Amino acid sequence: MSNTTTDHAEQVEEQDLGAAGSQLSTTPKEELANVPAMGVVGWARWFWRQLTSMRVALLLLLLLALGAIPGSLIPQSGTDETKVADFRDRHEVLAPIYDKLGLFNVYSSVWFSAVYILLFVSLIGCIVPRTWQFVGQLRGRPPGAPKRLNRLPAYTTWRTEAEPEQVREAALALLKKRRFRAHVAGDAVAAEKGYLREVGNLAFHIALIVMLVAFAWGQLFKMEGNKLIVEGGGFSNTLTQYDDFKPGTLFGTDDLTPFSFNLKEFTGTYETSGPNKGTPRTYQADLTYSEGAYGEDRRTVVKVNKPLEIDGTKVYLTAHGYAPVITVRDGKGKVVFSDAVPLLPLDSNVTSSGVIKVYDGYKNAKGVSEQLAFQAAFLPTYAAGNEVSSSFPALINPVLNLEPYHGDLGVNAGIPQNVYQLNKKHMKGFKDSKGKQMRENLRPGETMQLPNGAGSVTYEDTKEWANFQITRQPASGWALAGSVAAILGLAGSLFIQRRRVWVRAVQGADGVTVVEMAGLGRSESAKVPEELGDLAGTLYEEGAPGAPDPAEDPDPTDPAAPAEGAEK
Amino acid sequence: MTLAAATNESLANLSNTLIYSAMAVYTLAFFAYIAEWLFGSRSKVGRTAAALTATRTKGAAAPAVTVRKAGGTAVLERPQVVVRATSGSRDVPDGPGAHGGDEQGDLYGRIAVSLTVLAFLIAFGGVLSRALSVQRAPWGNMYEFNITFSTVAVGVYLTLLALKKNVRWLGLFLTTTVLLDLGLAVTVLYTASDQLVPALHSYWLYIHVSTAILCGAVFYVGAVSTLLYLFRDSYENKLAGGGRPGRFASSVLERLPAAASLDKFSYRVNAAVFPLWTFTIIAGAIWAGDAWGRYWGWDPKETWSFITWVAYACYLHARATAGWKGRKAAYLALLAFGCWLFNYYGVNIFVSGKHSYADVGLGALQAVGF
Ligand code: HEM
């Protein structure tokens, strides 16, 4: 087919279909980049039209995808502050540039926000007119039949003895029964079905807006904090009780839900044999909690994927470890420290480490005030031959290794210290008889004597600790509702075909009625001709039985096209 | 307990044996598909060229319905539906398939499909015994993910075949990919089944990962047909422009479905699975909400799922935008599939995040492929 004929054919087709093919969707027409009329208003209108065109929506979508990439490759301060710090240390030239470009917090950067805000403005600018247009389409009626039905993607024709009037009536009844919106326009019945597709599409795009707003709301008013609690300890929801606290921009401390809870017991059980030996089976924390300031105590169990929810605030169990109970005595036998000290787990068998710090109350053998510290390594299951790491995560054969130090912990300087690390700058190790750093393995109940009457340290017992993440993310219900609506709308939009059917019945030259039927879908689909065939079959059977064909071609208007359809 | 350990051990070994056997059978299927293509090259079809130089519009018949005339039993001819291509698209018949109408080629093609079915069943057994040996879903690490993924991809292909879709031409490409995927799995990614795994007691995770795998398999089918569409489309363009494509290109491309059919097929496949992909991401978010206390945190895996989603949304939009139909949209579809692939391999290998290692104290999130 040469180009000129194709073009010609298309032109003819466009004219032929005219209104019939129009508005089969509410997709905006692509307008060519016509030069806007002068003046601010002209430009504004031009800009608006560009912004709400499908082409720009596509471009913005692409930009959104592109813009999301750097955030996945460069450490983000929102997710991992330490990695960002690490990156800054290693890239002295790049880091300031990245800072300027907002690459350490891409998803809240100006440029990323600009892209999605523009996209959503475009989306709203697209939805509103489309909705009106769709309402108009619902109020109106399906457009009348085009002049030449045989130009449509699916077409069929036959001759019948029934009167044209009767055929149209039968067709109207049939189409209505099949839940088409149908009416008679001139010599033909016009019908349309599948409006739910448009509803689905609009619902989907509106749901996107709901999701975005809900997400943004959640980000602004969220809060997130952590609290480590040793068995027997408790927490009440006020700012000072948190180990760390990250509020959203608009979160006020008054928004903290009043409640408190105590950790009664933490239980972890593990697979004891087989290929999954050591794999956690249960992690659970038994709590008593009370709502409000004076609520009554209630019991509950919090598991890994089962947070406790109190009035929109959720309490998650996020980590656990061991806290040996330590008693430290000075040379005179006076207890100067007695507490459970949480240690940090290092591996999946909960090999742990930490520091026990005795800040005040201790006097050395000479009666001088000093501070003490013990570098601690803990193995919940010690197995001979493996001195450095635990062999199993449960508390089966616990061993606590302690390295005692004395001196000045340096806290008085006012510099904040990590409770899990020991600053040895002003600390001296206790030496054993050979002059080496003292170090001893203790089992529960065992005591280590410090040299020269400096005192003793006893490993009494082991408690477990659990870390709780306390979060509040408002509007997540809306986000969920939005996503459900989005999926449903999308399914409607993609699986429902919007299509039109026309049935024309006219008296032929020889007085016999000629029935023509044609179908048009928004996109080319095998369903449209299939359905047309089915409708034609039914109509043929019920309302317009066939008449013998005359010798001449059944459709004199176009000798070429229906030849195959009329093949016997 | 030791008895259980022993059964687990033997199940794991059985799984390995089955995976290797499946690879062997896939290899046989691969050669059978090659034979189909080779025998098919004997026939000279040249239908495309004929259609592109002819001027008449061709039509295809619609489903036949026999109508009985009242009173009589004579079968009347019923109205038949003429189908026309919409304006702007070329009206070219589909190629005959890899066998090119050659009988021997067709025979080899059938053998290839049978072998694919056999290999699928064996691989399925392999995945199943692996799952039983570790007593959890078989996607705890990349090895397991790979064997599951390829099995599901073949499953999708066989389902399409069973639904009488014209997809046999996919066979050769599919078996090639599957062999690469499994080869990679058993050599580079192999992980003994006694690896530590998390106790992730959330059914959302199972829903999330299984739909993710299914989506990946369907996206893969879409991507292959998009790629072939691009080749076939250039071939048809060349013919329509009066050019003469090379002999190899003609022989292979001639036998594929028409560009329009391939395009339509890939669109349908991608569009059909897009809502499921949307659901997958949302299921993941729900699970993340349960597990980590936030439903969306721009973790690399989450970010790339989102990028993939937006890329497919771009593709669907492009199809609705006049200037972007056809080849441009096809490039977008390939790009989107690239994002999906990167989300799996790239993110797991190059980027670390919550999904790929344990930075949450429980160690509970270790080794989750997704
Ligand atoms: C937030 C980003 C957006 C996403 C993720 C998105 C996604 C989608 C998807 C997946 C479809 C396919 C459904 C179908 O083919 O029926 C679609 C269709 C559509 N979108 Fe969007 N869209 C977005 C923004 C926009 C914007 C800004 C506009 C308007 C300028 C728009 C206008 C349309 C139209 C008119 C259709 C229907 C096309 C048709 O009838 O086939 N969308 N959108």
Image (spheres, rainbow, N blue to C red):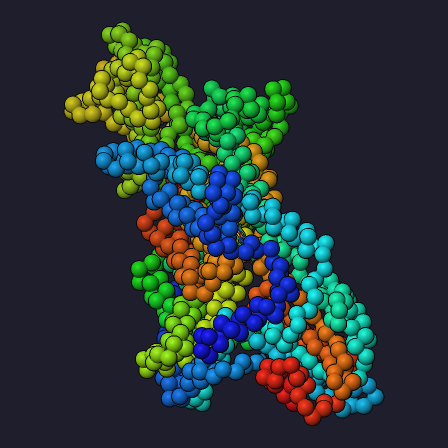
**Quadrant housing residue B29:** bottom left
**Quadrant housing residue B97:** bottom left
Residue A546 in view here: no
User: Which is nearer the eye, A122 or B153?
Assistant: A122
Would residue A319 be found to the left or right of residue B279 on screen? left
Give coordinates of residue B188: x percent, y percent.
31, 60
- What number of labels is visible? 0
Give coordinates of residue B348: x percent, y percent.
36, 51
User: Which is nearer the eye, B213 or A308?
Assistant: B213
Residue depicted at x 65% and y 49%: A132
Residue A19 in view here: yes
Would residue A136 be found to the left or right of residue A45 on screen? right
Residue depicted at x 64% and y 65%: A20
In the rendered view, would you say B93 is above or below A228?
A: below
Residue depicted at x 61% and y 85%: A559
Residue depicted at x 45% and y 80%: B52
In the rendered view, would you say A81 is above or below B9?
A: above
Name the residue furthest top.
A367
Give coordinates of residue A140: x percent, y percent.
72, 56
**Quadrant housing residue A420:** top left
In the rendered view, would you say B7 is above or below A353?
A: below
User: Which is nearer the eye, A531 or A188?
Assistant: A188
In the rendered view, would you say A321 is above or below B328?
A: above
Name the residue furthest right.
B71
Give coordinates of residue A158: x percent, y percent.
71, 82
Name the residue furthest left.
A434
Name the residue furthest bottom.
A551
